[in-house]
Image: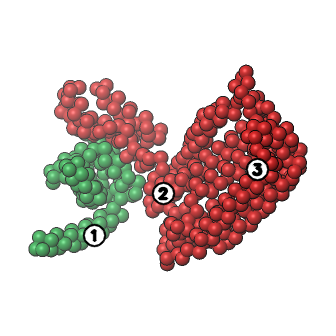
Amino acid sequence: MNTLLNSLTTELRRGTLTLAVLSQLQTPQYGYSLVQLLEQCGITIEQSTLYPLLRRLEKQELVTSSWDTTESRPRRYYVLTAYGIEIFQQLKKEWEKTSQELSLLLKGDDNG
Amino acid sequence: MKIIGLYIQEVTRRLPEKSREDIALELRSTIEDMLPDDYTEEEVKPVLEKMGNPAILATGYLDRSMYLIGPRYFDIYINLLKIILPIAAVVSLISLIANTIISYSGEEAVLNILLDSIGTGIWAILSTGIQVFFWLTVVFAIIERTDHKDSQIPLTACFKEWTPEDLYNIPYIPKEKAIPKVEVFLGLLWTAIWASIYFNAASLLGVYEKGNNGLEFVMPTFNQEVLLSYWPLVVMVIGLEIAVAAFKLLTAQWTRKIATLNTVMHGVSSLVFIIIISNNQLFNPAFVTYMTDLFSITGDFSTWILWGAIVTFLLFAAIDIYQGFRKAKLQSMK
């Protein structure tokens, strides 16, 4: 039964990952710092999901990336573009609406 | 550290040339970010485990599907397979049977030929099936990869997305009225068998006797020249049977039209059958004598077998005609 719960949870979270990542890219982040930021908020993301996701977001022109070679180790930094900010705001609204609707539904369930 | 390089190589070798270097650099910096400054190989392993299977990571970068045929085409693919596979199997089987009978020289025992045919028949069906399956799959895999539309909505048999309008194109077929495909195919099989036997009656139908090499063909039942002189009529009947089979496949249910066509077919083939069999030159005189001796039948052997055959033939035809009209008449529940 646990594997079913696991796969349902993964499915439930999958859609929110993009939003979570976008939310943290308002300031420039590199891969590992992003993982840490997300983990601090309790969101675990598979590494094999995150890096390709960042690439995809870049391809969709929601983020831009640049190599920073000033530190001892070169790192690739990602940050939201203007278009990315716009999309992020809309997606955020969409999420807030959804979570409100859902909590209403779930509350109704508790009372019933 | 070597193991990191190997891991990165495992990922990048699956990627297009132009993005390899960039992704390799990023992966290396990411992996090293997760490690302390002075790391050992033992410390690297859990980090790589966290990065996951290189193949999966590479697929993520590729943004390409890990399946051969996706949800958009899967349904139509399966449907086509279901239609084409049985047709291909039956066609290969029919041609094999026809071939075997036509090329039969009359030297081998029929039982041996029969056993051989079962073996080659199974093999023919299997190999045709595998061929069909392979090519259809290849075609769909190519379609899947060349279709760059983002939509994942499954397509219907007309390669369009489903709309309620499509329902009007589906015939409503109640179970009692339906003509099963198996029935049509068996009919075709039967046509192929009797047609092949007809054209090779001289070496197939007749008296077999136990000889030195198993069963030996002694004499044919029919006077082959007389029998074959009716070939235009026989070809006409074959054509009719194939036409009716095709019609049955297309409509897939009994209608008045099909039942009428069925009646015409049976009428014509009965007529042809009676014409052929009532020719008193038809039977090989030697065969008639042989049979009369064997069963010590008093009276005319030809007449006896003639009426038996005609009555049997007409009886089966009549039953089939009746069934056709009965099923066509059944009220479909709407």
Q: Which residue is mark 1?
A: A94
Q: Residue at x 89, y 44 (%)?
A: B225
**Rendered location of residue B92, percent (x, y):** 65, 44
Q: Earlier in the sequence, mark 2 or mark 3?
A: 2
Q: Are marks 2 and 3 on the same chain?
A: yes
Q: Residue at x 48, y 50 (%)?
A: B69
Q: Which chain is red?
A: B
The colour applied to the residues of chain A in this rendering is green
Q: Residue at x 48, y 57 (%)?
A: B75
- Circle 2 — which element? helix
Q: For residue B156, say whether it is visible.
A: yes
**Between marks 3 and 1 in the image, the one whose residue lies nearer the viewer:** 3
Q: Which mark is residue B75?
A: 2
| Between A28 and B241, the one nearer to me in the picture | B241
Mark 2 to mark 1 CA distance (whole Å): 33 Å
For residue B140, side relative to residue B275 (left or right): left
| Residues at discs 2 and 1 in contact (Cβ within 8 Å) | no
Amino acid type shown at disc 2: Asp
| Residues at discs 3 and 1 in contact (Cβ within 8 Å) | no
Letter of the chain that mark 3 sits on in the rendering: B
**Rendered location of residue B282, percent (x, y):** 85, 48
Category of crowding for the residue at label 2, using alpha-carbon neighbours closer than 10 angstroms: few (below 14), some (14–19), many (at least 20): some
Category of crowding for the residue at label 3, using alpha-carbon neighbours closer than 10 angstroms: few (below 14), some (14–19), many (at least 20): few
**Rendered location of residue B219, percent (x, y):** 81, 35
Q: Which residue is mark 3?
A: B305
